[in-house]
Amino acid sequence: MKRVICFLTLLALSSVSVSAQGVGNPRNGAELARETCSRCHAVRGGDPISPNLRAPTFSELASAPGMTVAALMVALTTPHAGMPMFMLTQDEREDIIAYILGLK
């Protein structure tokens, strides 16, 4: 039980440090989002609805409880219903994540 608690504590601390470090370039992320994501998502802060009504706005993603770098990385690298798989580099994913989280 102690090992599980230690592991969970280390995992929580590591995700905090990743978020605190910052990730990517939000300016590049904004451009990539317009080019890659805007067909389905409202990518600009303050846009009220997405072109695809089932796709959350980037502002909604940014303000979702528990939204972290890790959660967005999983979303961008794991196929899920309705989300096309894009071939983004690690840097491109980090830039888009930095942009989304900057919309908080």
Image (tube, rainbow, N blue to C red):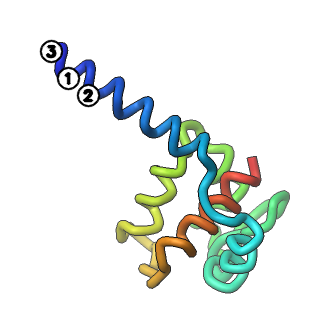
Q: Position of residue 12 (x, y in %)?
A: 41, 31
Residue nearest the observer in this picture, 22 or 85: 22
Q: Which residue is mark 2?
A: 7
Taking the spot 51% from the left edge, 45% from the top edge, the residue there is: 18
Taking the spot 46% from the left edge, 59% from the top edge, the residue there is: 73
Amino acid type, residue under disc 3 in the picture: Met
Amino acid type, residue under disc 2 in the picture: Phe
> Mark 1: which secondary structure?
helix
Q: Position of residue 25 (x, y in %)?
A: 69, 66
Classify residue 91 as left or right of residue 60.
Answer: left
The answer to which quarter of the image holds residue 14 is top left
Q: Which residue is mark 1?
A: 4
Q: Position of residue 61 (x, y in %)?
A: 62, 53
Q: Which residue is mark 3?
A: 1
Q: Are marks 1 and 3 in contact (CB under 8 Å)?
A: yes
Residue at the limit of the structure toward the top, as seen here: 2
Classify 10 Å Cα crowding around label 3: few (below 14), some (14-19), many (20 and above). Answer: few
Amino acid type, residue under disc 1 in the picture: Val
Q: Are marks 1 and 2 in contact (CB under 8 Å)?
A: yes
Number of numbered markers: 3
Distance from Cα at disc 1 to Cα at disc 3: 5 Å
Classify 10 Å Cα crowding around label 1: few (below 14), some (14-19), many (20 and above). Answer: few
Classify 10 Å Cα crowding around label 2: few (below 14), some (14-19), many (20 and above). Answer: few
Taking the spot 20% from the left edge, 23% from the top edge, the residue there is: 4
